[in-house]
Image (cartoon, rainbow, N blue to C red):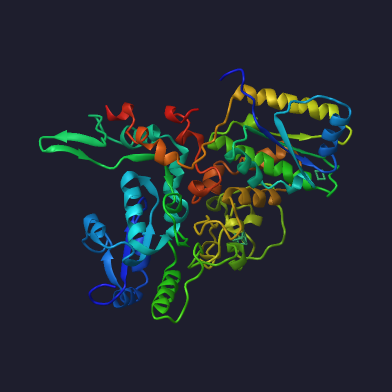
Amino acid sequence: MSDAFEPIIIGFTCNWCSYRAADLAGTARVKYPANIRLIRLMCSGRIDPTFVLKAFASGADGVLITGCHPGECHYIEQNYKALRRYLLLKRSLTQLGIEAGRVKLVWASAAEGVRLADEITKMVEQVKTLGPLNWPKWEGFFDDEIHSLVEIPEEVSA
Amino acid sequence: MSINGKPKFAMYWAASCGGCEIAVLNTHEKILDIDTNFEVVFWPIAMDAKYNDVKAMEDKSILLTLFNGGIRNTENEEVANLLRRKSQILVAFGSCASEGCIPGLANLSSLSDIFNASYQSASTVNPDNVAPKTSVSVPEGEIHIPAMFPALRPLDQVVSVDYYMPGCPPESHQISRVIDLVIKVISKEADLPPIGSVIGAGESTVCDECPRHRDVKTIKQFVRVQDIDKINADLCLLEQGIPCNGPASRSGCGALCPKSGAQCIGCYGPAEGVLDFGARMITALASVIESNEPSEIERILEGIPDPVGQFYRFNLANSLLRTGTAAWRNNASLKE
Ligand code: SF4
Ligand code: FES
């Protein structure tokens, strides 16, 4: 992996807490790496695991899920739902070969700009260590590359 | 039209188990309607015909081709392209052709692991280390067998598909309905559905067809159906802790499995509007788990020991990710 690897991280934020935390970090000029692309949703409960899979399939190297602290979700307990989805999704991703370190759940209140920036920085570092995910763009995958791939592997054709 | 004036019909199997063919035969006397209304020109399981016979046909001369099986090797791909060229209506018939099905689960493994499992594992007696080669020289010249692709693809990742008929296999009553429809279309009594439609299935979920009642109950433990002493005959299986795939699966089977006390495994593929079967199931299971404590949730999730097998049994090759990393990562030529 070259030193120049700059991961793309998709960050889902909740309108009421974590988005405000990110906003606060901005207002307070707290720096966090530009690797993260924040997407604002109304609540972490809005995060369909489909979004996360789509992010990886479209070239993201990591996905950060954020929401209000337990007990503080503005839609009562949707963040617990997000927590359960996240834990199950992480198990599925690991089985598919996507390292657990590429997804992360962070709770951040509207006042925690510094902490969120800190978590983002840590996540970016972590994904840098893991390296690029490089999920195939399937378009043309089988046409262009196939002839080098179809041979039966050496070790068994002995 | 053929010499006897009947429209031509073809059926083919690629990477599949043969169950789709059995399901067609299971339509009983309906099979005679196929014979009455069509000239069967190509159907390897039922009659002798060569690829060259198909190649010699005029383009678009086959009215209806039911294609079952996924695309696993170069032969599957070649025949898919050939039949696409020769057919007016190409149907991805059954789960393998529509979404990859069980053969698509091999997309979790690298080709070398697949070959090792087949030719070298403890269950295989192979003292001479025999393995197939894609080409071999014999006195008469070089001969070839088809080569494997690194992953299995559903039919529509290879050629354009007109209709999808889901099911592993499609239920015979649904096949009969589709045959009736096509015959009506031929005699101009009905129109074809819009291109790209799913035919021979419902538009809702298996839960919608399931007679079990839901109490919005949550659970503290997942259990395997075979480990339960007594299954409540009326209550939703998911609410009894049995991981049932009904919430993500397309209706059309009549909820056969949950009706007989077994969980839906999802063989009719994703319901209308479900982009990723697994994602929908993750959401569904997450909402029945009764806990907000990370460590307790983790303990409950131990009850789903094989999440990918549970969520993508039929749909991995057609999911948003399509494969696990093992299917492509170790192929040097694919690295940037
Ligand atoms: S989850 Fe399964 S048992 Fe429950 S309603 Fe849906 S199909 Fe029926
Ligand atoms: S409103 Fe912030 S997580 Fe629900």
**A63 or A34, which is in the foreground?**
A34
Q: Position of residue B63 (x, y in %)?
A: 35, 68
Q: Position of residue B43 (x, y in %)?
A: 28, 62
The x and y percentages for residue B27 are 37, 71
Identify the residue at horizontal 70%, vertical 29% (top origin).
A35
Vertical relation: B159 (above or below) B186: above
Callout count = 0
Quarter of the figure with residue B66: bottom left
- Which quarter of the picture shows residue B264? bottom right
Name the one closer to the observer, A46 or B116.
Answer: A46
Q: Residue furthest front?
A: B58
* Left-right relation of B255 to B78: right
Q: Is residue A16 left or right of residue B280?
A: right
* Left or right of residue A130: residue A19: right
- Say if B272 sits above or below B312 in the image: below
Q: In which quadrant of this rendering is ligand 2 seen?
A: top right
Q: Residue furthest top?
A: A3
Dividing the picture into quadrants, the one containing residue B140 is top left
Q: Residue A80 in the image: x percent, y percent?
A: 76, 44
Residue A58 visible to an observer of this rendering: yes
Q: Residue at x 34, y 58 (%)?
A: B85
Q: Quadrant of the N terminus of chain B?
A: bottom left
Judge whether residue B230 can be spotted in this image. Answer: no
Q: Nearer the viewer, residue B203 or B297?
A: B203
Residue in the image at 22% along x and 29% along y: B128
A48 or B64, nearer to the observer? B64
